[in-house]
Amino acid sequence: MDANPTRVEIEKSILEKGYRVSTIIDRRDPEANWGPGKEFENYIAAWYKLGNWYMRNEDSQISVEVLQDYLSLFRTAADCLAGAPQDAPYREEIEEILNDLRGCFYDIFKYAQPIDD
């Protein structure tokens, strides 16, 4: 990716990384796949890159596909956490992923410029 990627390029990267993450998540057996891994780190890093892009640019647009990707992973993680026993060893990893995802969107909402009427 270019040193100064466009928002669309960053969003494309998020979707590619999100696809890789979705292929390693087994929704029937969350314990097997929620541990720390490069795919999750790359996905979260791409979201933070988008937040940084908004910080440097006056823009408030985001693609529907990227929002759908975020919501899908967030919902899957939240559902797995809700169904996990309190002593499950993977609860901490899922909670960390959820917190990272929340942090990404906090940055996006913080820096995205509102549309002027």
Image: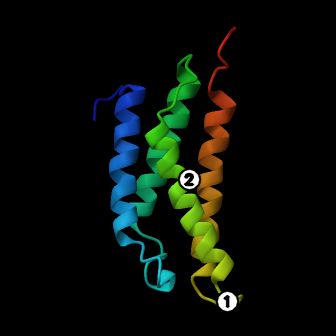
The residue identified by callout 2 is 71
Give the residue type at disc 2.
Answer: Leu
Q: Quadrant of residue 97?
A: bottom right
Which residue is rendered at x = 47% and y = 50% of the image?
Answer: 69
- The answer, for residue 89, to whether it is visible in the render is yes
Q: Quadrant of the C terminus?
A: top right
Q: In this view, does 106 lie above or below 89?
A: above
Q: What element carries label 2?
A: helix
31 and 72: which is toward the camera: 72
Q: In which quarter of the image is the N terminus?
A: top left
110 lies left or right of 32: right
Give the residue type at disc 1.
Answer: Pro
Q: In this view, does 59 lie above or below 11?
A: above
Image coordinates for residue 75, horizontal then vertical, percent: 59, 62
Q: What element carries label 1?
A: loop
Image coordinates for residue 12, horizontal then vertical, percent: 35, 39
Q: In which quarter of the image is residue 24?
A: bottom left
- The answer, for residue 92, to whether it is visible in the render is no
Which residue is rendered at x = 32% and y = 29% of the image?
Answer: 3
Q: In this view, does 37 lie above or below 60?
A: below
Q: Residue 85 carries which label?
A: 1
Q: In this view, does 86 lie above or below 70?
A: below
Outermost residue toward the top in this view: 117
Which residue is rendered at x = 59% and y = 72% of the image?
Answer: 94
Crowd tier of the residue under label 1, counting other residues whose Cα lies within 10 Å: few below 14, some 14–19, many 20 or above = few
Which residue is rendered at x = 57% and y = 74% of the image?
Answer: 93
Q: How far apart are marks 2 and 1 (CA)?
A: 23 Å
> Which numbered disc flags the more N-terminal residue, 2 or 1?
2
